[in-house]
Amino acid sequence: MDIDAFGSELKERRIRSGSGVPCSYFTPVVNYMGSDPGLDYVPASSEGEAVAIAAGLVAGGRPAFALMQNSGLGNAVNPITSMLYIYQMPVVLLVSHRGEPGKPDEPQHERMGVITDELITLCGIEGYVFDETSFGRELDDVLARQVPAGWVFRKGRLTGGSVAAPITFEAETSAFALPPRRRHVPAMDRYDALQVIAPLLNAEADRPAVVATTGKLSRELYELDDQDHSKANRFYMVGSMGCAAGFGLGVARTRPGKVVVLDGDGALLMKLGTLATIGAAKSANLHHVVIDNAAHDSTGGQPTASPSVDFAAIALASGYRRADTVSTADELKQTLEAHLSEEGPTFLRVVVRTGGKAELGRPKLAPRDAYARFRDWLAETA
Ligand SMILES: Cc1ncc(C[n+]2csc(CCOP(=O)(O)OP(=O)(O)O)c2C)c(N)n1
């Protein structure tokens, strides 16, 4: 299918946004997305991140695709099963089929080539083999039902389009000033920190969209002040560890209003590439806060690499406009207030000790209701 005809099929259904990690089969799609300023394509660091970004775009009211090679479908299985499936987010997955059985290809594609079609449906996602005569009809059908679905593209199905200009660039090193070296001794635990942060998320004027990472952080934030289900600006991620920032980036592209991502150090380390994606995207309305307890606290307090990592330095080196590290309640309040009043992307590392609220329950909002609440709030405040 010629790429312009394919692009028209997408445009007719308001799909003008997407994210992905390329496969040579999708070169026409990536070039096409770059050929028109009315189209929005976010190059992702990993396929799971691409799924999260597309899901954030969709939540914010922009139909979107995530494209990937089938080798990267393996990288995306958790976000597909824990996020797209659980919340029924209608992201359009475009998956290339390397290693198609019976066709010569490189050895690394052999096994994934055999399981690709089945893997999509095993993830609980409707799967189709791309056929240009039925694609439009299938898209209409899944979008009408608002369910996630994936199309597998055999070799050579998309053709034509302009050739992208070769990339010319200069690499700028040390383009940022590091804050002075200092030690940060934890003075709070995660729940203490959330008690300082939550009131800033509830501001009447300019209330931010909030995306909270999986695990006890989300559960504590819910128990803190959302048990009456009054905080429709919040989205608590279950599973999809590491995807809160990518999802927040997707949401941030759909609206002028602020988006606050509340992350964990384990989750951030799992998808550290997202810092580079956000830095490159220069999202002025994105504010990233990491509650860093140097542990996978939610699963029993097992250590992470955090103590030897200066996250704020990585954020600055990745293109964030501002990055700070704090450990006391006063510093946290003042610095977060400052970040929220400035252009992003900003990054705030909150150094805390392990532990948090005792006797923690689980949100009484079912995941699909939680997603609908957030999506509807984004639409009302767009
Ligand atoms: C892909 C994936 N791997 C592992 C888990 C299990 N898990 C849930 S929460 C969590 C720890 C998260 O650590 P961090 O982000 O630092 O937050 P904390 O629990 O310390 O607040 C882990 C490992 C998961 N949900 N998903």
Image (tube, rainbow, N blue to C red):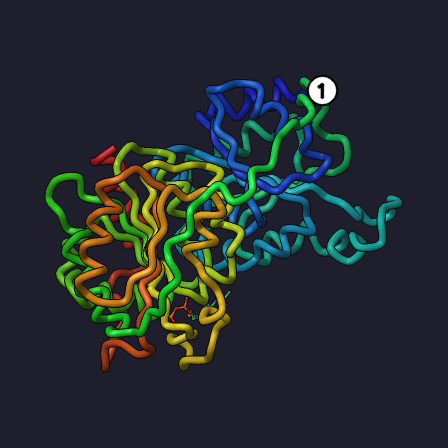
Where residue 195 sits: x, y (%)? 17, 65
- Residue situated in front as seen by the camera: 372 or 67: 67
* Image vertical order of residue 87 relative to residue 59, above or below: below
**In the drawing, does residue 81 fall left or right of residue 380?**
right
**In the drawing, does residue 220 fall left or right of residue 129?**
left
- The residue drawn where x is 28% and y is 67% is 327
- The residue drawn where x is 42% and y is 77% is 299
- The residue drawn where x is 64% and y is 42% is 95
- The residue drawn where x is 57% and y is 43% is 150
- Residue situated in front as seen by the camera: 154 or 288: 288
Q: Amino acid at mark 1?
A: Gly
**In the drawing, does residue 371 fall left or right of residue 127?**
left
Label 1 belongs to which residue? 160
Q: Is residue 54 visible?
A: no
Report the number of numbered marks: 1
Please state, as top left, top right, bottom left or bottom right, where the N terminus lies in the image. Answer: top right
Q: Is residue 126 visible?
A: yes
* Image vertical order of residue 153 relative to residue 291, above or below: above
Where residue 246 sits: x, y (%)? 44, 48
- Residue situated in front as seen by the camera: 297 or 309: 309
Residue sitting at the far left: 204
Residue sitting at the far front: 180
Where residue 240 sits: x, y (%)? 45, 59
Q: Secondary structure at mark 1?
A: loop
Where residue 261 sits: x, y (%)? 33, 52
Please rate how many residues cluster around mark 1, counting C-alpha atoms within 10 Å: few if below 14, some from 14 to 19, many from 20.
some
**In the drawing, does residue 121 fall left or right of residue 223?**
right
Check mark 1 vs ligand 1: CB closer than 8 Å? yes or no: no
Displayed quadrant of residue 378: top left
Q: Quadrant of ligand 1?
A: bottom left
